[in-house]
Image: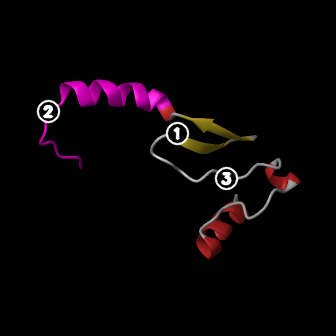
Amino acid sequence: MVRLLSNFVKFKKPILKQEELFQNLTWPKFDSQDLKYMTIDVDLAVQTDPRNYSTKRIVWDRHIQEPRSVY
């Protein structure tokens, strides 16, 4: 965990290259279209769409009218 954080602070990239320590994963760059992210648990895992966000976003966009504020 410390290595992930220190790499992020130094290089803006938590995992610099594929290593067995990080289960040969690469940290995905976040994109608002595919919503990939890395979960840090006993094992690392790359997942998409946290908490089914894309489905909720469709409903929000349909029912919440402009202008709207996000805090």
Q: Give the main secondary structure of the magenta stretch.
A: helix
The residue range painted magenta reads: 51-71
What residue is shown with label 1? 34
Quarter assignment of residue 10 = bottom right
Label ID, residue 65: 2
Quarter assignment of residue 37 = top right
Q: At numbered mark 3, what does the secondary structure look like: helix, strand or loop?
A: loop
Which badge, 1 or 2, is on the more N-terminal residue?
1
The correct choice, above or below, for 39 with respect to 63 in the image is: below
Image spot of residue 30 (x, y percent): 53, 50
Numbered label tally: 3
| Left or right of 58 in this view: 64 | left
Q: Distance of mark 2 from mark 3, alpha carbons?
A: 35 Å
Under mark 1, the amino acid is: Asp
Residue beneath the point at 67% across and 68% down: 7
In the image, 53 versus 32, the foreground residue is 32
Q: At numbered mark 2, what does the secondary structure look like: helix, strand or loop?
A: loop
Under mark 2, the amino acid is: Gln
Image spot of residue 70 (x, y percent): 23, 47
Q: Distance of mark 1 from mark 2, alpha carbons?
A: 24 Å
What residue is shown with label 3? 27
Q: Are marks 1 and 3 in contact (CB under 8 Å)?
A: no
The 10 Å Cα crowd at callout 2, few under 14, some 14 to 19, many 20 or more, is: few
Q: At numbered mark 1, what does the secondary structure look like: helix, strand or loop?
A: loop
Under mark 3, the amino acid is: Trp
The correct choice, above or below, for 45 with respect to 14 in the image is: above
